[in-house]
Image: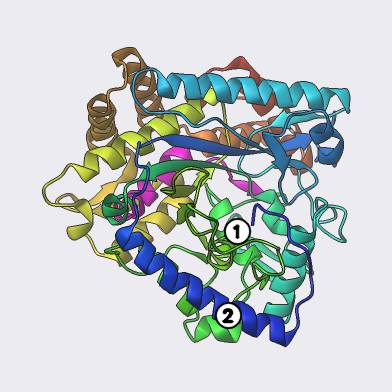
């Protein structure tokens, strides 16, 4: 879905042609995966989505103007108050992760400088707390681009009725209807990429799924949506429901949602592509002929236009990526469950945890995922999204355990060992170990800081909208301080 498309309306004949080409793509990919040589250097990469706010900490619809002043690494996201930046590919060895942190800080600063010219500022956060239902009505929230218009139309057409957000939280939680997929624009993330050899992809994906719960608990940064305190990582249910093409009856029948954790461990990358084709109808049925793109180019990997486009409309939390490249193809795992923010140091630490722990798990004689059911992994993911570092989950050999304790005594040390085995410099390893342990021991991730700060402001007389705006201002100050979120001030007063 990162590419532009040529139409927002498709005929039955076009849909039929797309289905036939999609199946042909899948057959070609299966044989190609078994015989081709892929680049497998273990490189890593990051995509970061950020929000724009005005002087009152309200969403600023200035993305078009801001992006006009930035280079091609910065692109639109679906919201007109969002921007996305793609960072250069690097390696986790040596100073690679520290270089990633510096790049994050530099890219955020560059975007913020461009935003200031247009009366706005950049805030990297999972959900911008000051988003209102009024903003998400109509179409002013949406960035320009046919693919966003098409996605909005087609999701609603497939669903046949309005989007219904129902998320547990304070009071009666959130219960609102929307006539567009606009709540999806509230969900801003940091996506981690890991280049993987074909024979290692299944193990890397299984490992990523197994640790999804602790990973999201450690990084949770999205407790407020539309004025309500909900899950510690509300992005998870909000994203699922915003892009849900199923009417309630289909959900009751067990039809899978398009934002999907999955339902089983895999033995090959092909399993995921085959599931996508078998289980999900096409949302954007634009064939390579319509896109004027060849299936094959001389001496190059197959482009697989239909398969890649379809894969982009099934939003797995750990998504498989096939990239034909320019010289040689490669495969990537795209880890999509982390929120944006708070600081570049926090985000680099989150990346270090993921890359180090996945690497360590791949070295184990008895894989973690062979000792836990897939349902346990999904239950842990949802519990950790709901309760953050306060969640209790079931873990192999430990039974029922508080996730913060699991992180401090087992998973963070294992991630640190993985970083050392990858060849990361000791100073780099120590830097991120200190941040990760400090956060887990204190129980203060971004979500906890936001909840505590809003609570403190309300105790001092602020209304909820006032508290959210002031908390957003203080949050932005914390981001610019560069200090990890667990070291930010623990209380707040109204200005």
227 shown above or below 265: above
Residue furthest to the left in view is 365
The percent position of residue 79, horizontal first and vertical second, equals: 76, 49
| Mark 2, secondary structure of its residue | helix
Position of the N terminus, as image quadrant, is bottom right
Give the mark nearer the N terminus: 2 vs 1: 2
334 shown above or below 114: below
Which of the two residues, 155 or 30, is positioned nearer the viewer here?
30
The percent position of residue 174, horizontal first and vertical second, equals: 66, 61
314 shown above or below 280: above
Position of the C terminus, as image quadrant, is top right
Q: Main secondary structure of the magenta part?
A: helix
Q: Residue 494 occupies which quadrant of the picture?
A: top right
The residue under label 1 is 239
The percent position of residue 373, horizontal first and vertical second, equals: 25, 64
Position of 160 with respect to 455 (left or right) is: right
Which of the two residues, 378 or 474, is positioned nearer the viewer here?
378
Residue 19 numbered tag: 2
Segment colored magenta = 205-225
Spatial distance from mark 2 to mark 1, Cα to Cα?
26 Å
Nearer to us: label 2 or label 1 = 2
Q: Residue 65 occupies which quadrant of the picture?
A: top right
| Mark 1, secondary structure of its residue | helix
**For residue 114: magenta?**
no
Dot 1, how many residues are within 10 Å of its Cα: few (below 14), some (14-19), or many (20+)? many
Position of 258 with respect to 224 (left or right) is: left
420 shown above or below 401: above
Residue furthest to the front in view is 298
Residue 293 numbered tag: none
Residue 60 seen in the current view: no
Name which residue lies at 22% across and 28% down. Answer: 421
Q: Residue 165 occupies which quadrant of the picture?
A: bottom right
């Amino acid at each position: 879905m990162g590419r532009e498309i040529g139409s927002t309306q498709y005929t039955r004949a076009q849909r039929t042609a797309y289905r036939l080409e999609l199946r042909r793509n899948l057959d070609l990919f299966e044989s190609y995966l078994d015989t081709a040589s892929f680049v497998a250097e273990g490189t890593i990469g990051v995509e970061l989505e950020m929000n724009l706010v005005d002087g009152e900490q309200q969403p600023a619809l200035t993305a078009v103007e801001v992006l006009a002043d930035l280079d091609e690494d910065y692109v639109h996201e679906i919201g007109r108050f969002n921007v996305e930046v793609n960072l250069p590919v690097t390696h986790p060895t040596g100073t690679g992760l520290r270089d990633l942190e510096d790049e994050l800080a530099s890219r955020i600063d560059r975007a913020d400088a461009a935003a200031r010219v247009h009366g706005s500022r950049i805030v990297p956060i999972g959900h911008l707390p000051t988003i209102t239902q009024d903003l998400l009505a109509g179409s002013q929230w949406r960035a320009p681009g046919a693919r966003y218009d098409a996605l909005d139309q087609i999701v609603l057409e497939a669903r046949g009725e309005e989007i219904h957000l129902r998320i547990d939280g304070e009071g009666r939680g959130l219960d609102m209807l929307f006539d567009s997929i606009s709540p999806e624009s509230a969900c801003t993330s940091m996506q981690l990429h890991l280049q993987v050899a074909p024979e290692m992809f299944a193990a890397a994906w299984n490992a990523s799924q197994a640790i999804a719960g602790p990973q999201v608990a450690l990084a949770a940064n999205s407790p407020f949506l539309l004025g309500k305190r909900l899950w510690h990582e509300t992005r998870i249910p909000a994203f699922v429901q915003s892009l849900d093409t199923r009417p309630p009856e289909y959900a009751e029948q067990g039809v899978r949602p398009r934002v999907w954790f999955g339902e089983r461990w895999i033995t090959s990358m092909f399993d995921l592509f085959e599931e996508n084709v078998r289980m999900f109808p096409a949302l954007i049925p634009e064939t390579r002929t319509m896109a004027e793109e060849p299936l094959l180019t001389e001496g190059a990997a197959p482009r697989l236009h239909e398969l890649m486009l379809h894969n982009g409309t099934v939003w797995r939390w750990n998504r498989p990526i096939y990239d034909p490249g320019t010289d040689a193809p490669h495969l990537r795992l795209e880890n999509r469950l982390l929120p944006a923010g708070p600081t570049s140091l926090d985000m680099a630490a989150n990346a270090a945890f993921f890359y180090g722990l996945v690497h360590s798990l791949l070295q184990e004689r008895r894989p973690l995922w062979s000792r836990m059911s897939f349902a346990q992994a999904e239950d842990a993911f949802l519990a950790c999204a709901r309760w953050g570092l306060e969640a209790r989950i079931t873990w192999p050999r430990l039974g029922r355990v508080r996730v913060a304790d699991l992180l401090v005594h087992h998973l963070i040390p294992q991630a640190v060992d993985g970083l050392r085995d990858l060849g990361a410099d000791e100073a780099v390893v120590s830097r991120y170990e200190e941040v990760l342990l400090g956060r887990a021991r204190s129980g203060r991730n971004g979500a906890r800081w936001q909840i505590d700060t809003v609570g403190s402001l309300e105790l001092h007389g602020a209304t909820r909208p006032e508290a959210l705006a002031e908390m957003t201002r203080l949050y932005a100050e914390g981001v610019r301080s560069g200090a990890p979120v667990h070291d930010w001030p623990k209380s707040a007063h109204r200005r």
